[in-house]
Image (cartoon, rainbow, N blue to C red):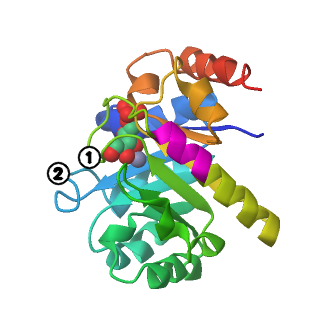
Amino acid sequence: MKYRIAPSLLSADFARLGEEVRNVIAAGADFVHFDVMDNHYVPNLTVGPLVCQAIKPHATVPIDVHLMVQPVDALVSGFAQAGATYISFHPEASRHVDRTIALIRDHGCKPGLALNPATPLDCLDWALDRIDLVLLMSVNPGFGGQAFIPHTLDKLRQARARIDAAQQRMGREILLEVDGGVKADNIAAIAQAGADTFVAGSAVFAGGDYAKTIGALRNALATVR
Ligand code: DX5
Ligand code: ZN
């Protein structure tokens, strides 16, 4: 299993964002996770395509855009032009989920579906074959620094089974990403349950020494059998 660590810039120093992106990549980040909040779909407000475009020259790894916005479609072309690799959205926030997936693909990006803690996996039924990433929220979206919701582990196991079947059917990779409350002391259990991609915001950026924290996350992952 190839594991990927995706530090969330939500906990970075926004006054020095380019430098933060370079530093966290130098420390071993596989993706840069970019949280977009609109004070409508979620009760917080962050950044848009302009800031994504500004960090793009500093990002030598894929930019993993997580849209927590409603509606979704109008922002897709902006983030595609700003250099996003993945664009994930919440199915509740789009009136036509299949159309939004196609729109992201047509713009040359990899579509992902983000599922809230209480959103059933059934919404993947007619979408999984068309996406590149499933993002399971292990907190309610809107804020960094929240505690991991334990029932996500059961949900990850069920999502893993669906994704394994889809990957076999189609012969291509679909990532299973977990987002919220990931730390060095729970990442092994989260990987054991089936996740392969790990968003970590406060764990990485609050620690100060990014290489040390990412190293601790990887050491914990190395214990997974
Ligand atoms: C929450 C965001 C997460 C958040 C993770 O709505 O989607 O990406 O920044 O932060 P931590 O790792 O601090 O829970
Ligand atoms: Zn996120």
Q: Secondary structure at mark 1?
A: loop
Note whether 113 is above or below 34 in the view shown: below
Q: Is residue 154 magenta?
A: yes
- Rendering coords of residue 21 (x, y %): 49, 38
Quadrant of the image containing the C terminus: top right
Find disc 2 in the rendering and name its residue: 43
Q: Secondary structure at mark 2?
A: loop
Residue placed most toward the observer, 150 or 130: 150
Note whether 78 is above or below 20 in the view shown: below
Which residue is rendered at x = 36% and y = 54% of the image? 51
Asked whether mark 1 and ligand 1 are closer than 8 Å, the reply comes as yes
Q: Are the two marked residues, 1 and 2, in contact with CB atoms closer than 8 angstroms? A: yes
Q: Residues within 10 Å of mark 2 (few under 14, many from 20)?
A: few
Indicate which disc, 1 or 2, sits on the residue closer to the N terminus: 2
* Region rendered in magenta: 152-158
Find disc 1 in the rendering and name its residue: 142
Q: How far is the residue under mark 1 from the one under mark 2?
A: 6 Å
Tell me which corner region of the image, top left, top right, bottom left or bottom right, holds residue 22.
top right
- Rendering coords of residue 80 (x, y %): 49, 70
